[in-house]
Image: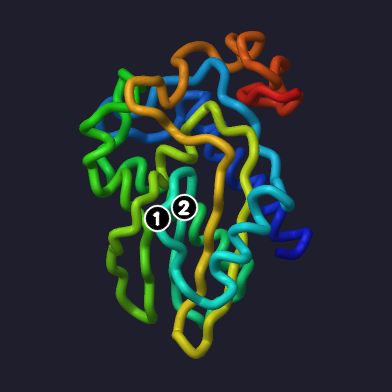
Amino acid sequence: MTDEMKKTAENMHNYYRRLIATGWAEDPRSKYAPRASKMNYLTFDCDNLAVPMKTAINKCQVPADAPGQNVHVTTWDISRQAALEEAITTWYGGLEKGGGIGEDTTYTTEMESNKMLTQYATVRLLVFTILVSICVKAPLQLAYEGSTKVGCAVKTCQAQGNTIVACKYNGQPVEGDPIYTVGKPCSGCSANTNNKKCEADSLKALCVA
């Protein structure tokens, strides 16, 4: 991962988290997903999250099922930067394709069993796209307020004809708990363990240290 790619991973994740936090994320259940009161800003973690992902995909094998992990597999003839951007965009897109979250943001058994929400790892090889059964919670990982860090790795596998993108987060939704707390953006930051302040970004949507 180049410095530019690390910054892209961080910026894109937080862009989509801001959309959710400010109530502009499209949701088929409620037109727009409800706003989030204490959505954390994600920082890129090289040592604890990115390095394990790099190791996991270094031999061009799609990582085994693991909590707090998103995987995207695309064609090999694409730049690693473009593959990373495609992956994060696709994961966020699963929020709508998977049926959305709705007004009640509690992580439910229904969500756990929803294959589009919990198994939205994609494979795009050349001119077609298929879904593969890798147990990840791609859209929900992007929306989960408890995560504060993300680490990603990208591997071009020309012999296999694909490029693998894998990101890991330091938190994941737990059944019965809220994916995020509904309310005015940043109004609940003070309740967080670490990120107790509102960001200086003009949208003032995410909680920072």
Image side of residue 79 versus residue 72, left or right: right
Q: Secondary structure at mark 1?
A: loop
Asked whether disc 2 touches disc 1, contact meaning CB atoms under 8 Å apart, the reply is: no
Residue 136 on image: x %, y %: 39, 49
In the drawing, does residue 114 fall left or right of residue 187?
left
Residue visible at 55% across and 77% down?
Answer: 59
Estimate the spatial distance between the alpha carbons at disc 2 and disc 1, rounded to whole Å: 9 Å
Q: Classify 158 as above or below 141.
A: below
| Mark 2 Cα-neighbour bin, 10 Å: few <14, some 14–19, many ≥20 | many
Q: Position of residue 8 (x, y in %)?
A: 67, 53
Instruction: Give the mark nearest the N terminus, 2 or 1.
Output: 1
Image mark for residue 70: 2
In the rendered image of this protein, does residue 121 appear above or below residue 14? Answer: below
Instruction: Please give left or right for residue 127 compared with residue 156 in the image.
Output: left
Kindly identify the amino acid type of the residue bearing the numbered disc 2: Asn
- Give the image's coloring scheme: rainbow
**Which amino acid, by three-letter code, is at mark 1?**
Asp
Q: Which residue is mark 1?
A: 65
The quarter of the rendered structure image containing the C terminus is top right
Q: Quadrant of residue 64?
A: bottom left
Q: Where is residue 81 drawn, in percent x and y?
A: 63, 66
Q: Nearer the viewer, mark 2 or mark 1?
A: 1
Q: Secondary structure at mark 2?
A: strand
In the image, what residue occupies the spot 49% across and 59% down? 87
Image point (75%, 59%), residue name: 4
Q: Is residue 26 left or right of residue 149?
A: left
